[in-house]
Amino acid sequence: MQTTNDTSSPQQSLTVRQFVYAWLFDPNNPNNFQKKFDHYIFVLIVLNALSLLAEQIPVVHDPYAWLFTAFEQFSLAAFTIEYVLRFYVAPEDPDFAKARSSRFAFVRSPYALIDLAAILPFYLSMFSLIAIDLRMLRALRLLRLAKLFRMVIPAMKEFREMNQGRTFRQQVYALLHPTETSGRLQEMLDSFVVWWVFISVCAVVLESVESIHYVLNVHFIVLDAVAVFIFSMEYIFRLYSCVENPEFAKGLGRYRYAKTPIVMIDFLAIVPFFLESMLHQLFDLRFLRIFRLMRLLKLTRYTTSTGTLLKALKREWPVIAASTFIMLLLVVLTASLGYLFEHDAQPDKFENIPQSIYWAVVTLASVGYGDISPVTPVGRLMTIIMALVGIGIFAVPAAVLSTAFNDQLHKDREVMHNELMAHLKDGELSEEEHQHILKAAAELHISAEEVEILIERAKLESEQAMKGQLPMAAIAERPEVAFEQFRTMVGNMRQIMSAGDTASMHQLFETPGRATEDEKAVWRQLYRS
């Protein structure tokens, strides 16, 4: 089918092989799917390792044997497709393009040999070409872990090149914190720690199942020891390199850094293991094992939404504290009235006010488990009233926090927009600045399409600002740009209202002759919200 458009893009002139390489495997193309493709392969490799471990647990494997088989077949197909595609595009890969036979050079490469060893025995055994024990066949799946070197080794080379001439401590800091010289290796290390958090927490949960713990007792001990070693090394290296941060460079920087909440969480994630190991002869500290679940809190370091939520919580804390106080007041009052009216009728359930607090919380939260319920007419009437009141009272903190979170996210996006405008002062956006904006946008969960719209809008604003006129014609041509411009204007108006004297501004707007009816309508709407 031919196109009627005479203008062909560079992508349209590519051959199928070139297109596949550029679309999936070219690391120098920032707009392709190479990073996503590597990420999916990484996740599949890790899931294969976890699946191999789960197969050793009969209570987990036997009821879902068909699911494990289907997952193995899917993984085998996915890795086979990856190998075939890499073999097909080998002539386009710079690592093999100069060889006399690029595909033969690819087949001989260490990565390709690992990929082939991870899938070939399964096909050979499928067609009865080789006789191999089933357990050995399953163990060969561990070779798929070696496929991770395809992503790790290039990242390590990139990291070494970016950190030439820097001290060991500076390199450690760049490896543990996102900096200009961190590169992909820092992202991989973050992913590695996150996966180990999930694995260790899952192990703690499964360890409580007696049938699973009986079979994998030694595995759980080894896994916990490995997890503690990883988290301990991370904690030590973070303390060692924190002085590279100007905030902790002077004085007792490491001590101040160790007192920060996120580092305290890192410490609490490992201390139960050492306390139990050193003091088990003196005290029974097995109860400390449950505190290993605090490792989940380590994920707050790797989720930017948590930081946004904490900012919103800190900003709206007075309102949330007031609503929490009202809730506590209602709980105590409801519990006291419940005890007063129901104690004589149900002395076993409303024995005292502390016991009635449980019923009050369940009633105000509109959960109503039914294990404790009033039987007197006055008590039932009070329950109806308190349940209706609780719907509104318990919804206030959630509504306040949700609104504050949205406002904080909008402010963070405005900060990113201001950074973008600062980068465009010279009229151009360099590749480094573009990557910085993309990274900031990813932290704010802004899609690549939205980023391009923001960049285009910022360029228009920058060009028109230098000309001294508003880009009305350019805005009118693009509805999405007009939409973003309107959001920016509303955000600026909200900032002015939050910083200024809104009561005096409202009085000025209501003064006859000072503003048009349209301006008054917009102001009144913002003032009410």
Image: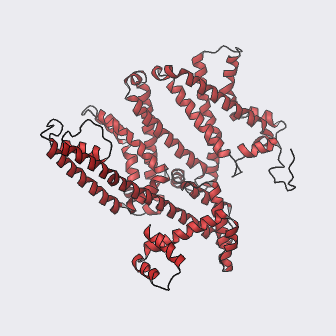
Outermost residue toward the left?
344
Q: Position of residue 474 (x, y in %)?
A: 70, 70
Outermost residue toward the bottom?
513
Closer to us: 248 or 435: 435
Q: Position of residue 109 (x, y in %)?
A: 73, 34
Outermost residue toward the front?
377
Q: Position of residue 127 (x, y in %)?
A: 71, 16
Q: Report whether 421 appears left or right of 329.
A: right
152 vs 319: above or below: above
The answer to whether residue 259 of the structure is visible from this angle is no
User: How many discs appear?
Assistant: 0
The answer to whether residue 177 of the structure is visible from this angle is yes
Q: In the picture, which quadrant includes the N terminus?
A: top right
Residue at 69 percent across and 79 percent down: it is 467
Residue at 50 percent across and 77 percent down: it is 520
Residue at 19 percent across and 46 percent down: it is 378
Q: Position of residue 26 (x, y in %)?
A: 72, 46
Closer to us: 98 or 476: 476
Q: In the picture, which quadrant includes the C terminus?
A: bottom left
Q: Report whether 294 appears left or right of 474.
A: left
Residue at 45 percent across and 53 percent down: it is 306
Closer to us: 130 or 480: 480
78 vs 245: above or below: above
